[in-house]
Image: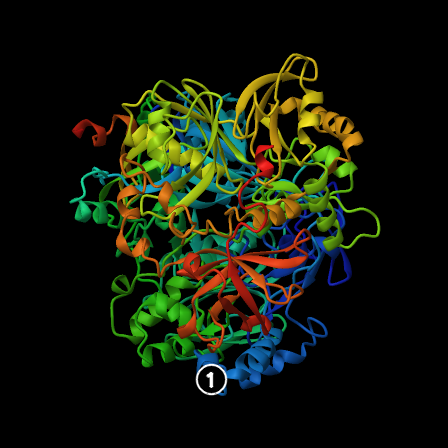
């Protein structure tokens, strides 16, 4: 499998480290009523058959965290974006 | 006897040179360009092995990598390699091969008695027979079966050769260098595309080398030669001979193994035996050719029964005839060429046997031309156990005729070699017209051409190869010229293949390698097996080194018939990598033994080696465990190192701890969010201990972080978690809080850092520092940090930190000064009695101080459990805050850290032991906790331990039972504070 890093170009799988589901959003830890959101965030992960957004880090290269859109049934990679430009912080 | 079956003036072998080799100790000769198989046949040797189950005599069936029978042990000693195919072994001078699976000799094999038991040894025999008693399986049945059945033996010595891994990239990868592959490579490479052409053979050309056809007025052999010459002249085309593409992976990644030195007695200096390639290709064209199918009939496994195409290969490519009197048994016209080629080479063709329902005028005509008898019928019986002597032929009217022969060329049509098209999950589809499976849906960027695509004729191979090569180049952005070869028109109507001869006598083998006969498949069908993959596992059809390349479809045809279904509906087994066997050595490459992974050496390593240090692996690091003196036991060494550090001064290399530089105007805020305690208010020039949690509230790592400047922090992590923490910080910075102005970078290898610990440590640091720098207790108190210069201008960071509990400093210098610094420290410390200490003494001292380390930060403990619950800030957001507050993670009954002192100081507190109340029975119900760390404290003259104990901090003074049933050990211990020595920390602050 190959992943096209926005900084380094198409590189082999071994250079990347997988983290998992990139659709999760870290809730506000000071909101004491957010228990359900926290349980979801820490323990629940989507596992779709088909397109999925995942966090990968280019650990063997530039160390950028990436948001990779991958088809879990074919391993086809549809999109790779920098995670720092992802949606999570824009909601803040 | 010298090469009695060599045909003078024929083939591509170099008749002018002779190569000597041995087979089963017999000295023989061949020519350069031979395979072991062709050289054996040239010498009239037909019997080359014994079969897997029945130990039946076997010969050479094919001329390629699909060979099921002719497996030999190649080479001797440490280089002995079992199960190599004689049909692919390139002959070299001094080659030494031995037959397998026979004892005492190939001709007289005692276990051939298994043949008499063949009615018993049917499909599923092992499953049915050796079921009871279960314990007999491991001890008796399996070893017995393994000894009797089996293939060759590995050398069991260390492989003396090297293996490499390499990467290649191209626009178009062409797999296979036959008619289709050469055409594809030419069409693509002529456009200027970067092309890699891989072929498993040592001469390119595939079937072009084996046939007597013509292309563009040249013989096929000459055309192949000129095509290769042109490809070699194109600068962006690379030809890889002896290279098998064995696997297809995601994203246009292909695995290939190049047999760099297998054709030589031993690898040349600095050359590997084999090289594993990862080829990344934008487009690929699979031109892997096809496999000829045998026809299944009684005793079809006798030496001398060969595939018709293989006979042509031996005659036309190698200049060898497998025999002098041939019979052809084929259901198709393609195989008639074998009769013509044999006759042309002066071999007598006795008969052409055609099993089709209707006689064929074409076949009859070839028979007339070659002087052979044409019989519309079947092979009814074969005689000659060690080599075929005659066949009995039964014609359509039922009349029998026995004909003497020493070679029987068989053909039941062709199957595409479509294996590589299915590695990513593609399913082959049934082609009714061709009566074979052809490639189905292909992975992105892959094309198939030639026989692999069901384009069997020469014209179709050339045309489909050219088209696929041109299309691939176009998809890479190149402009191919218009196709020069027209696609051929359909030639005649297809005929239904003859899969097997039902009336024939003797055991009829479908899979030669596993001795699977027609009767086994019928039995499996009767017992309810319907899916080819299930039949494979039950009967072993299609298993082992050849993976059924010559047997799968015949087996499926029999299964279809036995279960009353159409063959197209039965399908085939799933093909997975590797296409042909790949040595584990090639997959491992350099990563074996000590080189399995890189070894990281601390900056003081060379010095520590000089001191006779004993080392220990800590992750990839090699750290000094202890520095023994002659005559000392390990315990004495550790006791001495600890005592010397506590009374005088010791030095320890702590460079392996993770070091992370954190900079930016929001660095303090960032650290507030990754540690449970606060850092933004830490004064410049100060250091603080911090604990990090995972988001689920459990402890992840701990360490100290120093504030070197307003916007510059320097973090340390444990050795084990250095990489993990670094990745975690990068995630936090890039994904969670990209709005913060902060950057992190690992500096673990940039700084050499030494802990100088003990009452006399200040004197040594003072001696190292350049003059005019003050580290007195007043100017530089406990937990201070700062930048200094040492040893005449070298930048040095000093941290007044202590893991040992003594007055201590850590001094860090750029890594290149590390070796010099340790030597300077030792010189400066000589008058104060300095001694180095290793990680073992380090561990003893931290246990004496009750500092948590790896055994306590074990992924199951919280801040509360580590006695650090009160450090958790209530005011700020930090990783793990919300989940870490959960009630269950903070209740008193949870196991929390305590110290343990045995009532008898000579009794050990075994790490891993569990704790129960003093009088309780040692069982899971009474379990109250477990010992995490243990040590002998020379200062207390007692064994001590750290443990996680339920409600532990409230139970100081209570006696508990330390139970270690695994090692049959129990002792009583008093629960105490984990701070065994200097609990108030007075020694730190002097």
Image location of residue B668, percent across then percent down: 37, 25
A41 or B585: which is nearer to us? A41
Residue at (28%, 39%) from the top-left corner? B874
In which quadrant will I find the N terminus of chain B? bottom right
Along the viewing direction, whichever of B841 and B208 lies nearer the viewer: B841
Q: Is residue B705 left or right of residue B17?
A: left
B560 lies above or below A50: below
How many other residues sit within 10 Å of disc 1, few (<14), some (14-19) or many (≥20)? few
Q: Report the side of B10 relative to B636 (left or right).
A: left
Question: Closest to the observer: B732 or B24?
Answer: B732
| Count of picture labels | 1
Residue B849, x across and y down, in percent:
56, 47
The vertical placement of B757 against B207, above or below, is: above
Whether residue B217 is visible here, answered yes or no, is no
Left or right relative to B210: residue B486: left
Image quarter in which the C terminus of chain B is found: top right
Whether residue B528 is visible to the viewer of this picture, yes or no, is yes
* Camera-nearest residue between B172 and B815: B815
Label 1 sits on residue = B131
Q: Position of residue B885 (x, y in %)?
A: 28, 48
Image vertical order of residue B145 relative to residue B569, above or below: below
Helix, strand or loop under label 1: loop
Q: Identify the residue at horizontal 36%, vertical 58% (top origin).
A: B574
């Amino acid at each position: 499998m190959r992943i096209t890093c926005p900084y380094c170009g198409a590189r082999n799988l071994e250079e990347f480290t997988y983290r998992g589901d990139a659709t999760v959003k870290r809730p506000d830890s000071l909101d004491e009523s957010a228990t359900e959101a926290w349980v979801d965030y820490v323990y629940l992960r989507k596992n779709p058959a088909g397109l999925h957004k995942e966090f990968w880090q280019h650990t063997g290269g530039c160390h950028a965290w990436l948001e990779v859109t991958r088809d879990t049934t074919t391993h086809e990679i549809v999109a790779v974006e920098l995670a720092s430009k992802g949606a999570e912080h824009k909601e803040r | 006897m010298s090469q009695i079956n060599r045909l003078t003036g024929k083939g591509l072998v170099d008749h002018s040179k002779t190569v000597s080799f041995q087979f089963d100790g017999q000295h023989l000769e061949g020519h350069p360009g031979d395979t072991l198989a062709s050289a054996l046949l040239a010498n009239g040797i037909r019997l080359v092995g014994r079969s897997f189950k029945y130990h039946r005599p076997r010969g050479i069936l094919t001329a390629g990598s699909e060979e099921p029978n002719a497996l030999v042990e190649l080479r001797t000693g440490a280089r002995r390699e079992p199960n190599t195919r004689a049909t692919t072994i390139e002959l070299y001078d001094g080659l030494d091969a031995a037959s397998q699976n026979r004892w005492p000799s190939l001709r007289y094999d005692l276990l051939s008695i298994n043949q008499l038991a063949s009615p018993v040894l049917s499909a599923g025999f092992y499953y049915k027979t050796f079921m009871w008693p279960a314990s007999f399986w491991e001890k008796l049945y399996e070893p017995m079966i393994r000894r009797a059945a089996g293939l060759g033996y590995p050398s069991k010595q260390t492989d003396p050769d090297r293996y490499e891994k390499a990467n290649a990239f191209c626009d178009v990868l062409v797999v296979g260098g036959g008619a289709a592959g050469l055409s594809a490579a030419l069409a693509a490479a002529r456009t200027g595309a970067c092309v890699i052409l891989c072929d498993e053979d040592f001469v390119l050309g595939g079937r072009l080398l084996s046939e007597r056809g013509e292309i563009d007025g040249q013989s096929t052999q000459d055309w192949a030669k000129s095509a290769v010459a042109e490809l070699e002249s194109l600068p962006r085309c690379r030809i890889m001979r002896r290279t098998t593409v064995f696997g297809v992976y995601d994203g246009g990644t292909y695995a290939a193994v190049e047999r760099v030195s297998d054709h030589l007695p031993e690898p040349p200096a600095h050359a590997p035996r084999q090289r594993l390639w990862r080829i990344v290709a934008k487009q690929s064209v699979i031109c892997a050719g096809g496999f000829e199918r045998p026809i299944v009939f009684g005793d079809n496994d006798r030496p001398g029964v060969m595939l018709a195409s293989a006979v042509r290969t031996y005659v036309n490519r190698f200049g060898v005839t497998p025999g002098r009197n041939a019979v052809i048994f084929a259901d198709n016209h393609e195989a008639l060429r074998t009769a013509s080629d044999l006759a042309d080479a002066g071999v007598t063709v006795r008969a052409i046997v055609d099993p089709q329902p209707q006689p064929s005028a074409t076949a009859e005509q070839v028979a007339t031309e070659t002087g052979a008898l044409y019989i519309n019928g079947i092979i009814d019986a074969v005689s000659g156990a060690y080599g075929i002597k005659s066949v009995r032929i039964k014609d359509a009217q039922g009349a029998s005729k026995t004909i003497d022969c020493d070679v029987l060329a068989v053909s039941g049509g062709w199957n595409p070699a479509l294996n590589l098209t299915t590695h990513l999950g593609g399913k082959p589809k049934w082609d009714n017209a061709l009566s074979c499976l052809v490639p189905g849906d292909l992975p992105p960027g892959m094309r198939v051409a030639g026989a692999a695509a069901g384009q069997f004729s020469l014209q179709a191979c050339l045309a489909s190869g050219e088209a696929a090569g041109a299309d691939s180049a176009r998809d890479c952005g190149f402009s191919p010229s218009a196709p020069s070869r027209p696609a051929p028109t359909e030639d005649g109507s297809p005929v239904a293949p003859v899969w097997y001869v039902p009336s024939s006598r003797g055991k009829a083998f479908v899979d030669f390698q596993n001795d699977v006969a027609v009767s086994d498949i019928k039995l499996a069908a009767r017992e309810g097996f319907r899916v080819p993959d299930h039949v494979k596992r039950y009967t072993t059809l299609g298993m082992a080194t050849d993976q059924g390349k010559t047997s799968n479809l015949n087996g499926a045809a029999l299964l279809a018939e036995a279960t009353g279904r159409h063959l197209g509906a039965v399908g085939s087994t799933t093909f997975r990598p590797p296409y042909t066997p790949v040595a584990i050595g090639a997959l491992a490459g350099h990563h074996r033994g000590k080189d399995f992974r890189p070894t990281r050496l601390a900056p003081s390593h060379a010095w520590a080696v000089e001191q006779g240090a004993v080392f220990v692996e800590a992750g990839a690091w090699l750290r000094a465990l202890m520095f023994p003196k002659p005559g000392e036991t390990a315990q004495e060494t550790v006791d001495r190192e600890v005592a010397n550090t506590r009374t005088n001064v010791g030095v320890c290399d702590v460079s392996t701890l993770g070091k992370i530089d954190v900079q930016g105007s929001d660095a303090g805020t960032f650290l507030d969010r990754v540690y449970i305690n606060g850092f933004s208010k830490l004064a410049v020039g100060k250091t603080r201990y911090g604990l990090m949690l995972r988001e689920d509230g459990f402890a992840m790592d701990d360490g100290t972080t120093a504030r070197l400047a307003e916007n510059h922090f320097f973090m340390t992590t444990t050795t084990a978690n250095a990489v993990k923490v670094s990745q975690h910080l990068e995630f936090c910075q890039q994904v969670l809080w990209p709005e913060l102005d902060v950057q992190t970078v690992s500096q673990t290898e940039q700084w050499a850092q030494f802990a100088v610990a003990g009452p006399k440590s200040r004197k040594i640091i003072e001696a190292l520092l350049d003059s005019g720098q003050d580290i007195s207790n007043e100017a530089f108190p406990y937990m201070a940090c700062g930048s200094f210069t040492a040893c005449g201008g070298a930048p040095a960071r000093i941290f007044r930190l202590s893991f040992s509990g003594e007055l201590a400093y850590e001094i860090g210098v750029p890594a290149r000064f590390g070796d010099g610094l340790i030597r300077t420290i030792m010189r400066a410390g000589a008058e104060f009695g300095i001694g180095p200490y290793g990680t073992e003494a380090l561990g003893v001292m931290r246990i004496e101080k009750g500092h948590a380390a790896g055994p306590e930060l074990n992924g199951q403990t919280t801040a509360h459990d580590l006695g650090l619950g009160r450090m958790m800030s209530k005011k700020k957001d930090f990783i793990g805050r919300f989940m870490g507050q959960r009630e269950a993670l903070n209740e008193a009954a949870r196991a929390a850290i305590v110290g343990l002192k045995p009532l008898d100081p000579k009794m050990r507190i075994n790490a891993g032991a569990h704790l129960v109340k003093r009088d309780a029975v040692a069982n899971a119900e009474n379990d109250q906790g477990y010992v995490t760390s243990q040590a002998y404290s020379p200062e207390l003259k007692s064994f001590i331990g750290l443990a996680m104990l339920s409600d532990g901090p409230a139970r100081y003074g209570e006696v508990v039972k330390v139970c270690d049933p695994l090692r049959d050990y129990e002792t009583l211990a008093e629960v105490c504070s984990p701070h065994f020595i200097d609990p108030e920390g007075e020694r730190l602050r002097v």
